[in-house]
Amino acid sequence: MSGRRKHARFVVSSNDGVLQVARDVSVIWTDGEPVAISSAPATVGDSLRIETIVDGVIAQFAVRVEESRPIVVAGAIRHRIRMTRVDPNGRTSNGRAPETTNAMEEGPTVPERSLQGQPARLSRDNHVRVLNCSDAACLLETAHPVAVNTVAGLQVWFDGHVFDDVVRVIRCELMVESDNLYRVAVELLAVTPAYAGSLRCLVRQEISYLEGGFDDLGYE
């Protein structure tokens, strides 16, 4: 793995974060509920967020996956993901309060007509715990598997401040000692300079402060 031997790393204790995994979809409406046509399936019960452009403004709202099934579109396999909107109290548009729904912020009211066949982004926030970092990669722990080569946004809280960066998943393994925890290795992508507030900038500062005090264990 990139960063396993050539890059110094340090252990990060009790630092939580979010790995935001997004995909491009097309959104339509059926009986007043959003339906996404996607190249990848979704898990029933998942809390997701839809973002799309309406009249030049980004509109976003929370949804819960009710159904995901494969369909054929123009000779290719796609997935029809039927969802219900979720309000800040965790209630779906049919009035139910699902036990497993994590309510997201309520998005603006969007005219349904403007979303017919609209390009959109469907995203999921995976809560993670950062185990260790180098200036090239991080090892995360999460309850949800993430596919290798997935490009995602990573936000991490350190001492009350939020740091973010773009990462690519290079390994995802189920922990032997746990049935529902995964260790996800990600590499930091240099899509922008290491600006103040980026995770790369923070890690490089920490490494310079902790000279000789790194944990030199691998990412296993």
Image: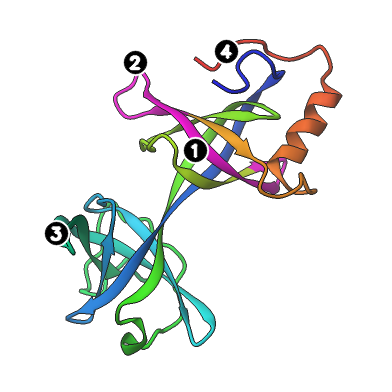
Q: Mark 4 vs mark 3: which is more N-terminal?
A: 3
Locate residue 11 relative to residue 27 in the image: left or right: right
Residue corresponding to mark 1? 128
State the separation of the CA atoms marked 4 and 1: 19 Å
Q: Which residue is drawn at 76% across and 47% down?
A: 193
Q: What's under tag 2, amino acid-wise?
A: Val
- Earlier sequence position, callout 4 versus callout 1: 1
Q: How far apart are marks 1 and 2 (CA)?
A: 18 Å
Label placed on residue 71: 3
Q: Is residue 134 left or right of residue 25?
A: right
Secondary structure under the numbered disc 1 in the rendered image? strand
The amino acid sitting under disc 3 is Ile
> What residue would you read off at disc 4?
218
Real-space CA distance between mark 1 and mark 3, rounded to the nearest whole angstrom: 32 Å
Q: Which of marks 4 and 3 is in front?
A: 3
Question: Is the residue under label 1 in contact with that under label 4 (CB below 8 Å)?
Answer: no
Of residue 39 and residue 174, the one placed in the foreground of this image is: 39
Task: From the top left corner, tell me how far across and down residue 172 is, in percent.
Answer: 41, 28
Decide whether residue 96 is among the magenta residues.
no
